Image: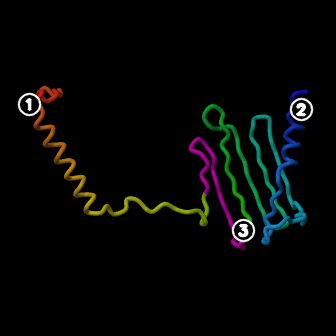
Amino acid sequence: MKTAIILSFLATVALAAPQYGYGRGGGDSSEEIPILRDDRDRDDFGRYSVNVETANGIVLADAGAPEGPKGAVVASGFFSYTSPEGIPVHVKYVANENGFQPQSDLLPVAPAFPHPIPQFVLDQIAFAAEEDRRSSSSRSSSGSYAPPPPRYN
């Protein structure tokens, strides 16, 4: 009974949500895109696979199994579509204990490391190291810190 109530609530929320179109004009699109393939498989051990293809070129393939730590699902797959600007988008991914890891030529890439360190930074590091060396050699041999003696004016 609780499941039926929850499912009907979720269906109501989904139907009440605003519908946003992806048309070039930004308006609502009433065009229905046929689904050419929708294959979904699942077994009793938690393994699954999904393969979907639509007439407008959207393709999705995903497969996973509970192989991660504590039975977490490890998934991999790809999806592709054409962006509103007409750019073909192809993304491969793996999702595991290290998180979601997409790969695509369209994703931004961090600069190569190690990059050259500017000389002023190296000079500052050397200066700080010299200060640390001097302050450690001026401390008492016991290695403990003592507050400065009080001043009486």
**Residue sitting at x 86%, y 48%:** 16
> Is the magenta region chiefly helix, strand or loop?
strand
Q: Which quadrant, please, contains the C terminus?
A: top left
Amino acid type of disc 2? Ile
Q: Residues within 10 Å of mark 2 (few under 14, many from 20)?
A: few
Region rendered in magenta: 84-102
Q: Nearer the viewer, residue 114 or 29?
A: 29
The residue wearing badge 3 is 83
Earlier residue among tags 1 and 2: 2
Dot 3: element:
loop
Q: Is residue 105 left or right of residue 23?
A: left
- Residue 61, numbered circle: none
The residue wearing badge 1 is 153
- Residue 5, numbered circle: 2
Which corner quadrant of the image does residue 93 belong to? bottom right
Q: Distance from label 3 to label 1 (Cα)?
A: 77 Å
**Where's residue 6, x and y in %?**
85, 34
Q: Nearer the viewer, residue 133 or 48?
A: 133
Q: Nearer the viewer, residue 105 or 40?
A: 105
**Where's residue 22, x and y in %?**
79, 65
Q: Residues within 10 Å of mark 1 (few under 14, many from 20)?
A: few
Q: Which quadrant, please, contains the N terminus?
A: top right
Asked if residue 96 lies in the magenta stretch, the reply is yes
